[in-house]
Amino acid sequence: MRSRKVKKTASKSSLYWYAIIAVMLILVALIIAIVMQKNGLFSKVQQPIEQIPEVVIEQPIKEEQPAVPAHEVDENGYIKNQTLPKEPTYINGILIASKRYPMPADFAPGEQPEAKEAKDKMLADAKKAGFILDAFSGYRSYDYQKTLYENYVARDGQDAADRYSARPGYSEHQTGLVYDIGEVGKESLWLTETFGETEAGRWLRDHAHHYGFIMRYPQGKEDITGYMYESWHFRYVGVEVATTIFEQQSTLEEYLGVQ
């Protein structure tokens, strides 16, 4: 009987020490947890994966470089020291003639059939609407434009002439796709801005694109086209292109992305 009591006493003593050790381990764990929490280590370890911010690799900032002009131009918009090319310039299949895109002196296509056909249809429909229009100036050769331009320069000076008349080799009339148009019986308004304010001029402005024509030098676009507003100057580009330019109230330069 005595031996059993001794074993029971020893067993109780062991349990007592086990309990003390367990409590001490728990206290140590709590102390470690408190220290980690205080130092911010615990929150970093326990942060859910989906809350960890995505690492963003920043690209170096590129400074915008100022656009460098491809060519130096004079005060009237012509490229300095430019010589006439051997071939005319076509962009997206469209012939362009401007102060930046001249044509060869020997480029002489004459009046283009598709432009003539469209012009005749347009003038016929204008007559049905009550307006008798006349395409009083169409194709011009290099030599003819040279004489015309030199006469304007002699009369008004080069700076003034460059606003409304092209230098030889730069005139759209040399393409054979252009017409200056006015109303018959009102010749005093031909080649004037006032023509654009007449009923005939407004009809032409609003309907020309149906026949493939655009007002080549519209109002407020001189800095883009290089020429003053010409309510009488219409260029054939085809119905689809003309309609797009008309609806966007833009210019051939803007449509082609050039200047």
Image: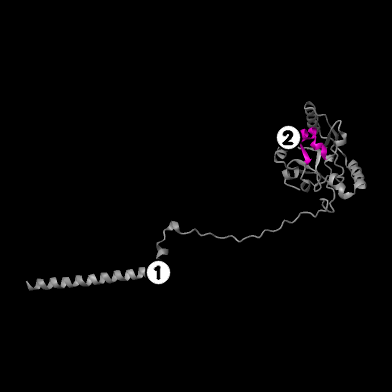
Say which of 227 and 140 sits in front. Answer: 227
Can residue 175 be seen? Answer: no
Q: Residue at x 16, y 71 (%)?
A: 12
The residue tagged with tag 2: helix, strand or loop? helix
| Residue 112 in which image quadrant | top right
Q: Residue at x 14, y 72 (%)?
A: 9
- Residue 220, position as x, y percentages in the image: 76, 45
User: Is residue 87 rendered to the left or right of residue 3?
Assistant: right
The residue tagged with tag 1: helix, strand or loop? helix
| Residue 254 in which image quadrant | top right
- Residue 15, position as x, y percentages in the image: 20, 70
Can residue 61 be seen? Answer: yes
- Residue 80, position as x, y percentages in the image: 83, 53
* Magenta range: 193-217
Which dot marks residue 97? Answer: none
Q: Residue at x 79, y 29 (%)?
A: 126
Q: Residue under circle 2?
A: 239
The three-letter amino acid code for the residue at tag 2 is Val
Disc 1: CA contacts within 10 A as few (<14), some (14-19) or many (>=20): few
| Disc 2 versus disc 1: nearer the observer | 1
Residues at circles 2 and 1 in contact by the CB criterion of under 8 Å: no
Q: Residue under circle 1?
A: 38
**166 is within the stretch colored magenta:** no
Q: CA distance from mark 2 to mark 1?
A: 77 Å
Q: Residue at x 79, y 46 (%)?
A: 222
> Mainly helix, strand or loop, the magenta region?
helix
- Residue 105, position as x, y percentages in the image: 87, 44
